[in-house]
């Protein structure tokens, strides 16, 4: 998430820049620059790209945690307190998103607060039609 340029002093806009899973970030950390080999001592060569690997199937072999029903309901009390303080401030002025929101969202929204947080992010509090649609969707039985 990155903060966008303000149109006026009361609105703060955010834009989703990149969406990636935790496993993608971990994989990127462990395989950072796999096509680059460092020169060995005494070697005259600089960086040499390694041959490309066939990882076409590899990209889709992990199950997606989102939507699979495997959501941890456990959350540290300190994290819930931090979110509670943020939400209290946010409810005082719904048109301005709190400064620490993006860093908390990056760390993960606690399962118990997701409904409230996503409605606030989407601006549903101003739209009775969307609130009613959301209420219907969360009470539907999905197979």
Image (cartoon, rainbow, N blue to C red):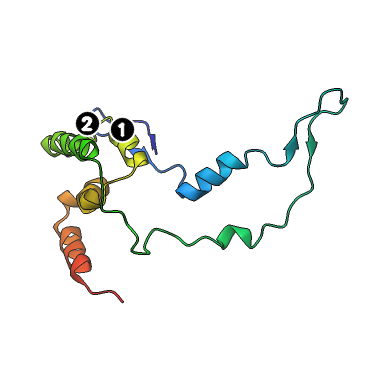
Residue with the mark numbered 2: 10
Q: Quadrant of the N terminus?
A: top left
Labels 2 & 1 near each other (Cβ < 8 A): no
- Residue pointed to by mark 1: 7
- State the residue in front, 80 or 123: 80
How far apart in space, not on screen, are marks 2 and 1 (Cα)? 8 Å
Q: Tell me where residue 78 appears, x and y as whole percent.
A: 22, 35
Asked whether, in this view, residue 9 is left or right of residue 106, the answer is left
| Residue 119 visible in image | no
Q: Residues within 10 Å of mark 1 (few under 14, many from 20)?
A: few
Question: Which quadrant of the figure has residue 59?
Answer: bottom right
Quadrant, the C terminus? bottom left
- Tell me the SS state at disc 2: loop
Q: Tell me which residue sits at (28%, 36%) in the image.
A: 101
- Quadrant for residue 30, please give it: top right
8 in relation to 34, above or below = above
Look at 82% across and 23% down and name the residue there. 41
- The residue nearer to you, when weighing 45 against 7, is 45
Residue extending furthest top? 42
């Amino acid at each position: 998430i990155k903060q966008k340029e303000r149109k006026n002093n009361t609105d703060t806009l955010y834009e989703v820049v990149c969406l990636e899973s935790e496993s993608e970030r971990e994989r990127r950390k462990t395989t950072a620059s796999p096509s680059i080999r460092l020169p060995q001592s005494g070697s005259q060569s600089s960086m040499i790209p390694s041959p490309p690997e066939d990882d076409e199937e590899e990209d889709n072999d992990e199950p997606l945690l989102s939507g699979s029903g495997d959501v941890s309901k456990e959350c540290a009390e300190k994290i819930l307190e931090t979110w509670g303080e943020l939400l209290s401030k946010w409810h005082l002025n719904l048109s301005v998103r709190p400064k620490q929101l993006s860093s908390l969202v990056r760390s993960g929204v606690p399962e118990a607060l997701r409904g409230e947080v996503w409605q606030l992010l989407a601006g549903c509090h101003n739209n009775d039609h969307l609130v009613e649609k959301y209420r219907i969707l969360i009470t539907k039985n999905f197979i």
